[in-house]
Amino acid sequence: MDNLTPGELEVMQVLWNADRPLKPADIQSLFPRPIRNAALRSALLVLLDKGHVARRREGRAFLYSASTRPTRELRRMTRKLAELFCGGSTRELIAQMVRTERLSPTDIDQLRRIVEESERESS
Amino acid sequence: MDNLTPGELEVMQVLWNADRPLKPADIQSLFPRPIRNAALRSALLVLLDKGHVARRREGRAFLYSASTRPTRELRRMTRKLAELFCGGSTRELIAQMVRTERLSPTDIDQLRRIVEESERESS
DNA sequence: GTTTAAGTGTGGAATGTACCACACATTGTG
DNA sequence: CACAATGTGTGGTACATTCCACACTTAAAC
């Protein structure tokens, strides 16, 4: 379960946004930029090895699907950013972002609503 | 002003946390893990070429200092995350983090204070 | 001047990433 | 069966990243 390279992330994006297993040709046509079929399949093999995707045969083709969820990867990445820039505190990282992205009090209110909702759910 | 690789980021962290220009041997001793002097200097040359550090001679040594600020790099990276995971919306990225990191209403209050302060400053 | 220590410059090896050409296998069609 | 279409497997190139060994240079000490 190694880290994702930029190119591998592009592939994962397509798989995460898909609602069903895809064969390489499908991924290719949904890809955000032109890519050769063989190049894409090479990336898929790496992702398979790293454990980020699973595949099953169907006829002569392989159907690929993501075996990790995007929120999990996002969390891994934000944690790394927090380590690097904020002494490991994700709270501080969020504060930084709020500052640099110039969020307004209205935006904060929306955040509060999100928090209150998620607290209600978990109780 | 190219992007930073993981290894280069480690070097930048040391420089950003330093309050004065450092020579390679200084960076080496502050490094978060063992690294050979020559390997470190190779990384510094790349950073110099990319424009992320500046250096000046002092005696027989070079003194290196960061020529970019950490907040700027952090912002670049969070924007990339937002592009990948949140359709380009940093607001949505922050919301995601607030959710997954389980911030409490008290934490949100602190964020609000940060926002109000920064708004007062900018007016 | 000679010697020694501290630093630098250079070339290059090892690995990982991204990409591709081509041969092979499988399925469906006449 | 022959044959075309679709997909896969394999090997291999080009490039960036990370790391290092070794020769050279400079400054200071004697």
Image: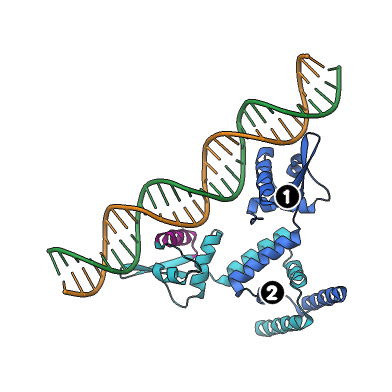
Chain colours: A blue, B cyan, C green, D orange
* Foreground pick, A1 / B46: A1
Question: Does dot 2 land on a helix, a strand or a loop?
Answer: helix
- Percent position of residue A86, x then y: 61, 74
Q: Nearer the viewer, mark 2 or mark 1?
A: 1
* Foreground pick, A28 / A62: A62
Tag 2 residue: A94
Instruction: Using the rendered view, name the quadrant where residue D8 is placed.
Output: top right
**Which residue appears at 73% of the width and 67% of the height?**
B93
- The stretch of residues the image draws in magenta is B38-52
Vertical placement of residue B108 versus B86, above or below? below
Is residue B82 visible in the rendered image? The answer is no
**Which residue appears at 68% of the width and 72% of the height?**
A101
Q: Is residue B39 magenta?
A: yes
Mark 2 is on which residue type?
Ile
Kindly check if marks 2 and 1 are in contact, taking CB atoms under 8 A apart as contact: no
Question: Which chain's residue wears label 2?
Answer: A
- Percent position of residue A108, x then y: 77, 77
- Percent position of residue A53, x then y: 73, 50
Vertical placement of residue A64 versus B87, above or below? above
Measure how far apart labels 2 and 1 are at the Cα level.
30 Å
Question: Does dot 1 land on a helix, a strand or a loop?
Answer: strand
Image quadrant containing the C terminus of chain A? bottom right
Question: Which chain's residue wears label 1?
Answer: A
Vertical placement of residue B90 versus A103, above or below? above
**Which residue appears at 71% of the width and 63% of the height?**
A74
Tag 1 residue: A53
Mark 1 is on which residue type?
Val
Vertical placement of residue B108 versus D10, above or below? below
Tag 1: Cα neighbours inside 10 Å, few (<14), some, or many (≥20)?
some
